Image: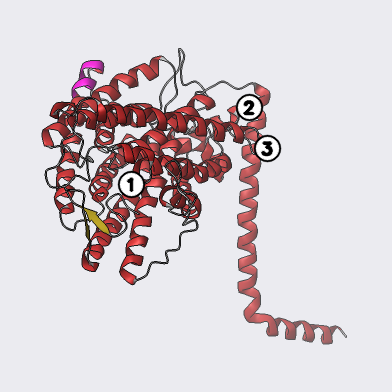
Amino acid sequence: MDPWSEKWSQKNKDGSLTPLTGQQLQDDGVWIITSSFTIFTMTSGFGLLESGRVSSKDEVNIMVKNVIDVIFGGLSYWMFGFGFTFGEEFLSNSFCGFGQFFFNPDDSNDVQQGWSYSSFIFQMSFATTTSTIVSAGMAERIRLKAYIVVAFLLTVVHAIPAHWVWSEQGVFFRLGVIDSAGCSVVHLVGGVAGTVATLYLKPRQNRFGDKGQQQMSNPTNAVLGTFMLWWGWLAFNTGSTYGVSRDKWRLAARSAIGTVMASAGGGITAVILSKIISKKIQVDMLIDGLLAALVSTTAGCLCINPWQALVTGSIGAMLAIASYQIVERLEIDDPVGVIPVHVVGATWGMISPGIFAENDRFTSQVTHGHNGLLYGGGFYLLGVQLLTVITVAVWSALLGFLIIWGLNQTPMGLRLSKYEEQLGADLREHGLAGHNVAKYKVEKKLTTKAFTSVMKAIMRWKRLTREGRERRERDRQFEFVQEPYNIQIDETQTSVHRRNK
């Protein structure tokens, strides 16, 4: 059920299987469940990063969408996603798993059952990350109801390529693909689906043109979110050893060093290029370069050494910043850098093992016995990596388009109207005017009639809110006064009544 095993065994260098003891399974389970908890903190990082890079009138909506990713995406993964990836029943094949839907393990003993639960929560943390990437591509434009459907379905879109790459039955797994931490099945799936979404939704109002601008409401939160993602990435990569028993702890340590070195290479490259391009260290370039470097490590994090990680991260950042400039010139509205980070970064990340991978002398499980170009492996591994990239990208683009197009045909709609977009999703979706509503920047001049209609709607909403608040306050006061004196009031009324008689 995991990339290391035929059920409860570990594959040795010679291809033989050595059963894992109960204690080793416990150690491995604790390692991956702890990694899962850390990976889930990346949701906070995504939320801060995304909300900090959009306009202030949409910050809360962005944070809510990251909550939606976990609760609806997690439900979908429990219902269908895990089964499509790791199901092993009779209908399972090289292209799709089948079984273990509505996940409820029935393993023969407590240790194996505990391992199954740990494995599930670890995989679910990866699946829900996929939809957060798509959320960034649709920022400030999609209705919340439609996004709930997107988050629910995206985990299923992730699950099928995950079967190809991670399941022992999967077509690319059998070919020997290297993708230890979801470079293709998480980042490329989310990145391509997010790109399709942002193209379909078209740019935000006044994003391009003579008066076009890119609003970053809170650069501090964006950088803070990057730090949280950076921290979570260590668990993302090191947890992909699927344990620490036997030789896995060595690979986990190696992966941690590689992750840090790649981020160093990417960060330095981003600083230098930003200074050359703009004469300043721009926050968005620094963030995109650093994150692209981290994405670049996710495929080969278990099989590259520190200097290779440094080079991989540096090249990933360079490609991301170059593509950032191209995206802007093509007037593609990519608010949070989905294309540079998760499409370009993931593509390079999948290619890099085809160049740098070296067969580990202690275990064959990481590279499946294959070497990259630098170590005499020829073009076989590179070809497998490229074939995986193309197939996963086509799958993600097709399914992503069908989901977005289908939602656009429904009564709930897909995109916010131009006036809703100007007022902001915080007000439209959550009723949050906040203390700052008077300062919201309307990017396009409204006609007198449209302005009057919008202001009437706002004033009516404020009046109803105030009246509701006052009514609730009166009800509370009435209850407070009336209850202790019911008897006294009755007696007073009675006595008054008698006097009148």
Q: Which residues are magenta?
A: 272-277
Numbered badge on residue 42: 1
Say whether residue 146 is left or right of residue 112.
right
Amino acid, disc 3: Pro
Q: Which mark identifies residue 411?
A: 3
Magenta region includes residue 235 = no
Question: Which comes sooner in the sequence, label 1 or label 3?
Answer: 1
Comes first in the chain, label 3 or label 2: 3
Badge 3 vs badge 2, beta-carbon distance below 8 Å: no
Which quarter of the picture shows residue 375? top left
Residue 172: percent from left, percent from top: 35, 37
Cβ atoms under marks 2 and 1 closer than 8 Å: no
Q: Residue at x 62, y 61 (%)?
A: 472
Type of amino acid at the residue the image marks with label 2: Phe
Measure the C-alpha gap from mark 2 to mark 1.
40 Å
Q: Which residue is mark 2?
A: 451
The dominant secondary structure in magenta is: helix
* Residue 126 location (% of width, % of height): 36, 47
Q: Residue at x 59, y 27 (%)?
A: 418
Which type of secondary structure does the marked residue at label 3 adopt? loop
Determine the secondary structure under disc 1: helix
Q: State which quarter of the image contains the N terminus.
A: bottom left
Foreground disc of the pair 2, 1: 1
Residue 16 locus on image (x, y percent):
21, 53
Between circles 3 and 2, the one closer to the viewer is 3
